[in-house]
């Protein structure tokens, strides 16, 4: 019954990295600096600010990337 059961193929980048890949190098640096800056950029504040600029990243991908629990760090 379960012959051929295999895990799904997952890309090697999370939503944050996928969105970052669409940006210029300078914007990419700004994004990753903001993600690293927990003090000045709480997750919800950063998500909202990015959304206002057309980058749709919700709390969960930002949090996972900050905590290095996304596929980028596995």
Image (tube, rainbow, N blue to C red):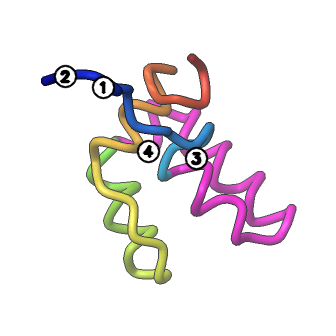
CA gap, disc 1 and disc 3: 40 Å
Q: Secondary structure at mark 4?
A: loop
Place residue 46 in its image quadrant: bottom left
Q: Where does the image place residue 72, in percent across and percent down from the top left?
A: 60, 30
Mark 4 and mark 3 in contact (Cβ < 8 Å)?
A: yes
The disc label shown at residue 2, or none:
2
* First reached walking from the N terminus: tag 3 or tag 2: 2
**Is 32 contained in the magenta span?**
yes
First in residue order: circle 4 vs circle 1: 1
Q: Residues within 10 Å of mark 3 (few under 14, many from 20)?
A: some
Q: Which residue is mark 1?
A: 5
Q: Where in the figure is residue 5, as x and y percent of width and height?
A: 30, 25
Q: Which residue corresponds to mark 4?
A: 41
Q: Is the residue under label 4 in contact with that under label 2 (CB below 8 Å)? A: no
Residue under numbered circle 3: 34
Q: Earlier in the sequence, mark 3 or mark 4?
A: 3
Determine the secondary structure under disc 3. Answer: helix
Do the residues under discs 1 and 2 have CB atoms within 8 angstroms? yes
Left or right of 71, for residue 57: left
Q: Earlier in the sequence, mark 2 or mark 4?
A: 2
- The residues bearing labels 3 and 4 have C-alpha atoms spaced at a distance of 6 Å
Residue at point 37%, 26% (across, down): 6
- Of 35 and 16, nearer the camera is 16
Q: Residues within 10 Å of mark 1 (few under 14, many from 20)?
A: few
């Amino acid at each position: 019954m379960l012959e051929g059961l295999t895990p799904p193929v997952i890309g090697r980048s999370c939503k944050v990295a996928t969105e970052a890949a669409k940006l210029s190098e300078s914007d990419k640096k700004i994004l990753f600096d903001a993600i690293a800056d927990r003090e000045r950029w709480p997750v919800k504040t950063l998500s909202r600010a990015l959304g206002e600029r057309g980058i749709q990243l919700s709390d969960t991908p930002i949090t996972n990337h900050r905590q290095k629990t996304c596929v980028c760090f596995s």
